[in-house]
Image (cartoon, rainbow, N blue to C red):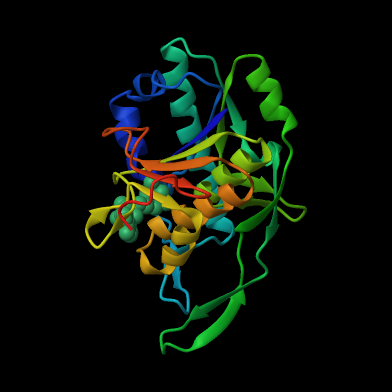
């Protein structure tokens, strides 16, 4: 079983060029797709005339703040993206089922967020509607896989208070861990992890853990997700660009077999 996360960064290209069936042809295994969609959200929030809020963490990382309104737009946009992916697979004769993450992913709402205010002082605000995943019910996914369907999962989770927005890289990591997938592929718009302008072809999870705060926004989440998947027993995580080569980019193992490039 292989879990494939499609990053928002390449979703539009994949959909416009109807490239997904061709990309998946290379894979001869059960497949679960998880998608992101942050950049679509920016576009639609603008279309709806809704001004998004961004916050900056004490570590300097800027991210979207999910208030109630943003959560609702997020949910609408994710269901549209999910629909487009399922449509492109079905058109190519591939059996696929839309699976809202809320059906099987549970999370806890982050109560508080520490951010920097305009004066660069730390302040604590309400966490909004993002969640940290704490459980995956594997049954619905296994049932679909057993019947030969590809589940197409949106990054939304259940919590008692509300449904929540969850990070898609980490959702894919948790799904791969709980389902004992042999591989997690994080498809994105770069060929892999770059360190000092050179691609890292292979690395072990310890190296990856050590460079998480040395890389920029976007890649940091992927590296964190990769280490989480490996810690949960996934044998191999690949960060790659499907328009280059889906099966090679940066490959991360618990212990790298060859220690090159670092
Ligand atoms: N060291 C790095 N190596 C590769 N990409 C990096 C690095 N640091 C930051 N990035 C950025 O991470 C981005 C991928 O993450 P992101 O934009 O969140 O894409 P996705 O939508 O696929 O999750 C790349 O486009 C790149 O700009
Ligand atoms: Mg991302």
Quadrant where ligand 1 appears: bottom left
Task: Please identify the quarter of the rendering in which residue 56 is found.
Answer: bottom left
In which quadrant is the N terminus drawn? top right
Q: Residue at x 60, y 64 (%)?
A: 128
Q: Position of residue 227 (x, y in %)?
A: 53, 54
Q: Position of residue 192 (x, y in %)?
A: 33, 47
Q: Residue at x 47, y 89 (%)?
A: 121
Q: Is residue 189 left or right of residue 93?
A: left
The answer to whether residue 24 of the structure is visible from this angle is: yes
Q: Residue at x 66, y 35 (%)?
A: 179
Q: Nearer the viewer, residue 61 or 215?
A: 215
The answer to whether residue 39 of the structure is visible from this angle is: no
Q: Position of residue 183 (x, y in %)?
A: 52, 36
Q: Is residue 65 above or below residue 48?
A: below
Q: Residue at x 30, y 44 (%)?
A: 189
Q: Nearer the viewer, residue 179 or 168?
A: 179
Q: Is residue 69 left or right of residue 84?
A: right
In which quadrant is the C terminus drawn? bottom left
């Amino acid at each position: 079983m292989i879990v494939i996360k499609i990053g928002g960064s390449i979703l539009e290209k994949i959909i416009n060029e109807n490239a997904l069936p061709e990309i998946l042809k290379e894979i001869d295994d059960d497949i679960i797709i998880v998608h992101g969609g942050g950049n679509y959200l920016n576009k639609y929030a603008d279309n709806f005339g809704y001004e998004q809020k961004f916050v900056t963490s004490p570590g300097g990382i800027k991210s979207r703040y999910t208030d109630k309104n943003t959560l609702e737009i997020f949910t609408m946009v994710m269901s549209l993206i999910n629909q487009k992916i399922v449509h492109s697979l079905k058109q190519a004769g591939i059996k696929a089922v839309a699976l809202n993450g809320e059906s099987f992913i549970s999370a806890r709402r982050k109560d508080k967020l520490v951010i920097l205010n305009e004066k660069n002082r730390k302040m604590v605000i309400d966490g909004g509607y993002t969640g940290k995943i704490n459980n995956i019910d594997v049954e619905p996914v296994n049932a679909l896989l057993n019947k030969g369907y590809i589940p197409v999962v949106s990054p939304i989770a259940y919590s008692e208070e509300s449904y929540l927005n969850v990070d898609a890289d980490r959702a894919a990591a948790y799904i791969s861990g709980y389902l004992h997938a042999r591989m997690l592929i994080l498809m994105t718009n770069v060929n892999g992890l770059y360190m000092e302008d050179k691609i890292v072809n292979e690395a072990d999870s310890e190296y990856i853990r050590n460079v998480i705060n040395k890389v920029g926004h976007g890649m940091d989440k992927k590296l964190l997700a990769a280490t989480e998947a490996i810690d949960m027993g996934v044998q191999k995580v690949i960060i790659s660009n499907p328009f280059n080569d889906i099966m090679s980019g940066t490959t991360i193992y618990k212990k790298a077999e060859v220690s090159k490039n670092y």
